[in-house]
Amino acid sequence: MKCCWGRDNMKKKHIIPAVTGICLAILTACSAPAYKDGTYKAYSSEDEEGAYGEITITITDGKISDCTYLTWQADGSVKDENYGKVYKGVESEEYYKTAQAAVAASKQYAADLKDFGDLELVDGISGATRSYNQFTEAATLALEQAQG
């Protein structure tokens, strides 16, 4: 009985992912739109609690070179390391952990957009769907400005 993982199959196993990766990189480079250089700011709509997102995207040489994203609470304070410590007047360690996960996800979304250069490649993070939706809304608006 011949093993299915012989030398010939091992070569194929390494070649296919390499070729797939190269093709993906080429398609990504070809499909990413060119933008007008500048800095663009946009805001998401408010969620049911009045919180919203603010994105600033910098375009250099037609590509995304920087991205920052802040989320704001309805009272005008930024969602930072203190966000979620008190919820509706009550301290809750569980709510704080959830809130901080959303803050971390928001930072990751901005970093991913900068690194990937394409909003379509930024994946949502489990437990931070609302943040992701607001991020993509604001990013879409900013990138539409950059398309001119």
Image: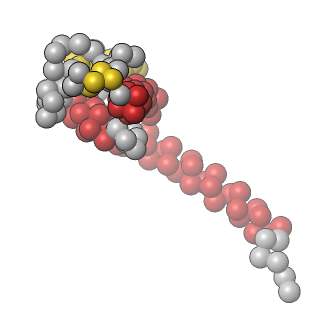
Q: Quadrant of residue 41?
A: top left
Tell me the residue at 31%/41% (across/down). Answer: 129
| Position in image of residue 9 (x %, y %) | 75, 69
Tell me the residue at 63%/59% (across/down). Answer: 16
Q: Quadrant of residue 92?
A: top left
Tell me the residue at 64%/51% (across/down). Answer: 18
Image-based side of 83 in relation to 104, left or right: left
Residue toward you, 62 or 79? 79
Q: Quadrant of residue 116?
A: top left
Above or below, 140 relative to 64: below
Q: Residue furthest front?
A: 90
Could you tell me if residue 72 is visible in this image?
yes
Q: Quadrant of the N terminus?
A: bottom right
Above or below, 21 relative to 133: below
Q: Quadrant of the C terminus?
A: top left
| Position in image of residue 25 (x %, y %) | 50, 43
